[in-house]
Amino acid sequence: MMRICLMLTLAIIIASGEPIHAEEPLDILFLTKSSTFEHPSIKRRDGELGHAEKVMVAVCEQDLLRVRATNDAGEINAENLVTYDIFVFYTTGDLTESGSGSGLFGGDGNPPMAADGLDALRTWVKSGGGFVGYHCAADTFHGEADTVSPYIEMLGGEFVVHGKQFVGRVAVTDAAHPSMMRFPDGWTHLEEWYTFKNYATDSIRVLALLETGPERANQPMYDRDPYPIVWCRTFGEGRVFYNAIGHREDIWDQQDFQNSVVDAIRWASGAGDASAEPNFDDVVNATE
């Protein structure tokens, strides 16, 4: 009986003229190059991928997302960019520098990006590419003094400092956004929470705020009103998404976080409406 049903279903599909093959997978490069501090969640041991890399590959494969993880920033070049649909960064420092590969802030010592790599990436995104950054992606390509670097301009915000880890609460500000529909409002977790400067207030759509709660009384840097930690924007014809969460390995094991990774990548690929109208003043000022 089951075989007959399958044959009938196949016949209906063929008669309708609809394709019976699966959707073509998206190709994603997950860059985990560290030019300064190398996070434990991406550190490779005994030749194996780091924990976050393993999770990214496994979770995305379940949703027709084909991921290749690399810590070679030299792969960000004009020739290679066109072979991918999405670039995901979990990076630190000036990626045109390899780092010494030793000491706490010596990086991983792996190959750097060429001098023109960032310009090529920005051009690619502006032409319709998709870019996703997690956690330390905002601790990458800092500007000199108070200047905003071209990379930070694209990303939409810049890491300043973090304190001791604590349990923070994530307040979703746009639950209808495609990248946030499966991420619960009020999500709490022990995490290393970043603070930021140089928000692109006229360009980003704030998707979630961090509520520091009781920690305001414990660490001065967190004695502040709720502030953006997840946002998106358009950049030319392309899409950019950033999520400050992802320092701890156990966060990468959380189903809610994994769902949001897939949804963010799908959104950045150009699926559906961008829904990226800037809302910084409406969302952030309303909490102050």
Image (spheres, rainbow, N blue to C red):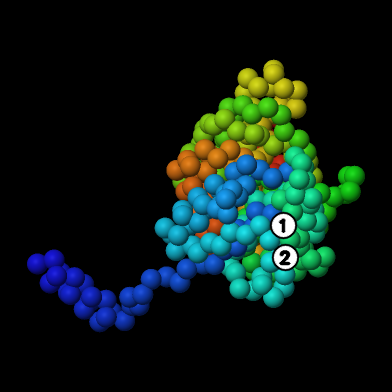
Q: Residue at x 9, y 67 (%)?
A: 1
Toward the left, the furthest residue is: 1
Position of 40 compared to 162: left or right? left
What residue is pinned by disc 1?
110
Task: Check the image and report above or below for 199 versus 88.
Answer: above
Amino acid type, callout 1? Asn
What residue is pinned by disc 2?
74
Crowd band around label 2 with a 10 angstrom C-alpha radius: few (<14), some (14–19), many (20+): some
Amino acid type, callout 2? Gly
Residue 87: percent from the left, percent from the top?
A: 63, 61
Instruction: Look at the image and tell me whether residue 121 can be seen.
Output: no
Image quarter in which the C terminus is found: top right
Q: Residue at x 69, y 17 (%)?
A: 217
Foreground residue among 46 and 113:
46
Position of 249 compared to 21: left or right? right
Looking at the rendered structure, the secondary structure element under dot 2 is: helix
Q: Nearer the viewer, mark 1 or mark 2?
A: 1
The earlier-in-sequence mark between 1 and 2 is: 2
Q: Residue at x 13, y 66 (%)?
A: 2
Task: Check the image and report above or below for 90 versus 128.
Answer: above
